[in-house]
Amino acid sequence: MPTRIDEKQLKKFYEEVGEKYPEEEIVYHTLRGKLRKKFVLDFVRHAQGRFLDVGCNSGIYLREYRNGDAVGVDLAHSVLLKARKRLYRNRSNRVFFVVGSAENLFFLKKDSVDSYLCSEVLEHVFHPQAIFDGIAHVLRPGGRALVTTPNYRKNKPKWIQTGELKNFQIDGDEYFHTAYRPEEMAAMAGKAGLSVLQQGTLEWEIKYATKIPVLILWSVRWLNRHFFKNPKIESWNMTVFEKLSNLFYGIGHFTGLEKFLRLFIKEGVRSFVVLTKE
């Protein structure tokens, strides 16, 4: 994708990603994905009333919601087709799907949802304030919303290489992918007239579980780039990285060592805010 705002090309890119890239099958088998899913599912399972998942992809969180009707919105029609096939089986509550942009939810009725989720979407949009304006529009007074996004410390990222997406024959050299600190999201929420119930970071366990595995990953990657130049080695390298990361996390978690390590880790690699509308 070119480094400029082009809504048509953006939609085309995400349609192709949705059709070719099995994101849920890949991401949620990683340690990061598992920790993120656990955190978001805690919000989803305590949500009530009409539930809206913006940027729902193929519906991993919609599948878990049981406390009312649900609506999934995504820019890519291709992922909504997948979600529909998976969700219209043995459902007691109704689930609706809408092709739409997270940056413009004003096609939905005002004050029409009780619970709102926008997980791993904010970092991909060009107008982040519009996300929070949309929450203020659709959320009923007293409702709750959760927004998650990558965190950063020093340099705020913008465009990144497509990386693994190329392995799935997806066109483009780079795509928009930034990050936000919790206080940045809280400020945008306040500007939209929303109140912050909670803000912070998650996936802090990544910082101790990947210390040794990432050294192995980088070392093998350097050797492969300069000597072997074999794509199969890179695939094997990533598999070993994920298995070792899960192993170190398991050791730290089940032995209680992570409670000690937590003292030296100030924040996690992902930001979140829980919001409401007065």
Image (tube, grey):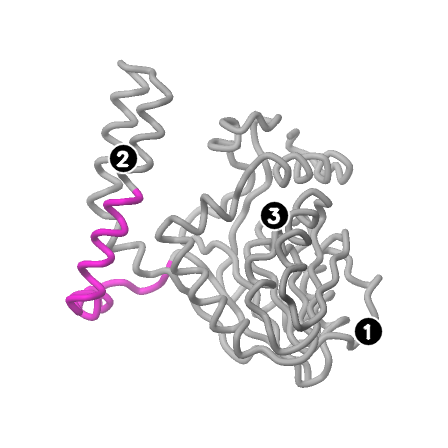
Specify the amino acid type for callout 2.
Leu
Q: Quadrant of the N terminus?
A: top right
Q: Residue 97: horizontal and vertical position, in percent?
A: 74, 58
Q: Is tag 3's residue or tag 1's residue first in the polypeptide sequence?
A: 1
In this picture, is 101 found above or below 64? above
> Residue at 27% across / 51% down in the picture?
246
Specify the amino acid type for callout 1.
Lys
Secondary structure mainly formed by the magenta segment: helix
**Tag 2 and tag 3, C-beta contact below 8 Å:** no
Other residues around mark 2 within 10 Å, as few (<14) / some (14–19) / many (≥20):
some
Is 130 magenta? The answer is no
Disc 1: which residue: 110
Q: Residue 3: horizontal and vertical position, in percent?
A: 64, 32
Q: Is tag 2's residue or tag 3's residue first in the polypeptide sequence?
A: 3
Other residues around mark 3 within 10 Å, as few (<14) / some (14–19) / many (≥20):
some
Disc 3: which residue: 124
> Residue at 68% across / 67% down in the picture?
52
In this picture, is 217 found above or below 36? above
Secondary structure under tag 3 reads helix
Q: Residue 250: horizontal and vertical position, in percent?
A: 23, 58
The magenta-colored residue range is 242-268
Depth check: 142 or 34 in front? 34
